[in-house]
Amino acid sequence: MTIVIRNKDKFIVNQGLRKTIIKPAIAAFAMVLSVGIVDQNVQAAEEEREGIVESSGNLNVRTGPDTTYDAIGQLEEGHSVTVVNEHEDEWYEITYDEETGFVHNSYISLIDEANEEAVDDAANEKLEVIETLVVNHHSLAVRAEASGTSERLGTLHDGDEVDIYNLDHAPWVLIKYEEQFAYTHTDYLTEATQEEEEEQEETEPSQEETVETKSASNASVSAIGIVTHHNLAIRERASGSSARVGGATEGDALEIIETVNGGPWVSIRYDGNIAYTHSDYFVEIEPASADLPVVDEGTVTHRALAVRQNPSGSAERIGTLTEGTDIHIHDYVNGGPWVSFTFKGGIAYTHIDHIDVVDNTPPEPTPEPPSDGELGDVIATGIVDHHGRLAVRTTPSGSSESLGHLQNGDIVQIYEYMNGGPWVKIDYEGQVAYTHSDYMNVTQMGEVIDTATVTHHRLSVRSGPGASHDTIDRLTTGDRVEIIKFVNGGPWVEVNYNGKSGYTHLDHLNLHSGNTGLLAGRLIVVDAGHGAHDSGAQGNGLVEKTVNLEVSRELAQRLEGSGAEVIMTRTNDTFLSLSERANIANRANADLFISVHANAFNSSARGAETFYHTSANPDSVRLANVMQDRLVSDTGMSYRRVAPANFAVLRQTTMPATLVELGFLTNSGDAAIMRQPGYAARAGEALHQGFLDYYR
């Protein structure tokens, strides 16, 4: 028998009695003493809360709040518990077999009171029906909260129609059941079949319900709405109980006429008539007029270029442009790098770094190459540092004829400063030309032009500028070099490295120049977990190694856009050992390290979780927390936990490091989120914002 005395949330255990059989008289005295002290000293218990066990194995229940206390039982994953007290030492006091026990709080997920509050709010507010769906399961559970472990209130049957009031806890939806609000799961709900809709249409409407169809020919469009719902109902009137006249899918553009009675319903143009839909499920952008000026034309060079509601990487993503798509640019916002363009009838924004702008300057006859006497000797190298287009002219004057343009990052050799500058003489397509040095990073001959990081695992260093020259050395991913010369403007460069020099190819170097933004000067290693024969977790049609790589690519692109230098441990379906992943970060002396993974367990385990090493410094803990917060708020995953772990990539790295688990492939709800179009971009942007939060 163990005597536990509560005193100011401290717990004193008579060690001598813990495992000893004592005489009845002594036991009786100890019980009296225990009861007396408890009556005098125990503080009022906190309000009881319900929780769910979330542990990969059985969870020990102990006699006191520490692992040194005896285990009196075990709880399985998914078991419900009642928490009667919370302690500062990260332990919960729970009710166990009609007695008190203790479990560590990292393995208990308290049931979100927001679910109960949502039902209470729904009862107090006049919620409108946003959609009506049909049950396609013989026995669909109706629950008190948005959780499969919540109290079951009743059952819906195949063919039952249910009105949907709220989608905030997807895949759970708020419905009304027996005159009270409750929840059920969308996996077993579908739209009414065409036969059912036709049957409804054939039913004679009452006098009150008869609605005259209004033509939209004279209605003006106030906004364009980009749909964010997979199946948005379009209705005859501004009501969820009105007849459905059509639907829109995610990414469709709607022509918005006006808001009805202050919202949330809006009138739209639909098949030439006025119809209605719900404003919670689209993003508004400004309509584009037919006479908007076009300042440039361009072609997308990225496989999946984000289209955003506003000119910012943190703005809501409303679509994607694929490689090869042509766009008309209306404006360079504040001079760039964001540009506005027409997208599905509205004005949207994207990043100029992934647009190849068409030069519409009329072609000039190709001049004869200048003689050495006209150009002279190279005295400096310039790298264009300008988000717009830098003009190249026939004479050193802004009013002279334009020969063409240089783009951000272009490299030129400078032969002369005209009258001391800022105009410089260059070679442009074989002829003498002039441009403005204020928009270049200029390095004099003999100086280090730039520094760079190697992005290839086995990069040849050669004796001369060309593949025909002998290989004299090799560099590996993460090695740093100094560039001292661009041979004929590139792509071969002369480099210094480890006290040696040689020539290598620019395509496998990540230049450090021109990095601006909050992450400028930061080196971040992005590790896409698993790869090749190591597929990682699998579930619900998803493979972890693929999810990891897609999210990591999106993250890397965004980090570079914010000025960071990024090294990816893998950029395709290849395998690296855990030690090599850590070594890449250590050799590069990276500032931060992130390893991207997806989870697997049983079908009930869900949510994002983030880890730091057990002996980590506070910076790793902070990094893990900002990543977890962003994954939850920006991707819709539930909050599982932030916890220490002894993973090799965290143990062996020497900089602040975190490993993120995006969600559970084995959970239908998490998998549904990860299968959504644009999920990889959304998760990559969430992690990108996490890095920005870390440095803010």
Image: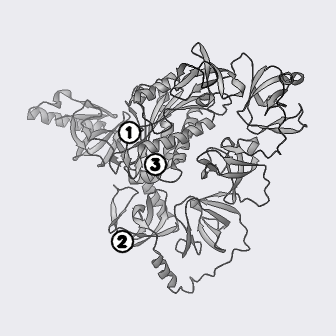
Q: CA distance from mark 2 to mark 3?
A: 29 Å
Q: Amino acid at mark 3?
A: Met
**Residue 287 location, quadrant:** bottom right
Q: Could you tell me if residue 441 is visible in this image?
A: yes
Above or below for 115 versus 134: above
Which mark's residue is nearer the viewer, 2 or 1? 1
Q: Locate residue 413 relative to residue 190 in the image: left or right.
A: right
x then y, percent, for residue 144: 38, 60
Q: Residues within 10 Å of mark 3 (few under 14, many from 20)?
A: many
x then y, percent, for residue 469: 60, 21
Above or below for 7 versus 551: above
x then y, percent, for residue 69: 24, 32
Label 1: which residue? 533
Label 3: which residue? 637
Q: Locate residue 290 relative to residue 317 in the image: left or right.
A: right
Q: Amino acid at mark 2?
A: Asp
Q: CA distance from mark 2 to mark 1?
A: 43 Å
Above or below for 161 versus 424: below
**Residue 500 location, quadrant:** top right
Q: Amino acid at mark 1?
A: His
Q: Nearer the viewer, residue 181 or 221?
A: 221
Q: Nearer the viewer, residue 468 or 624?
A: 468
Label 2: which residue? 158
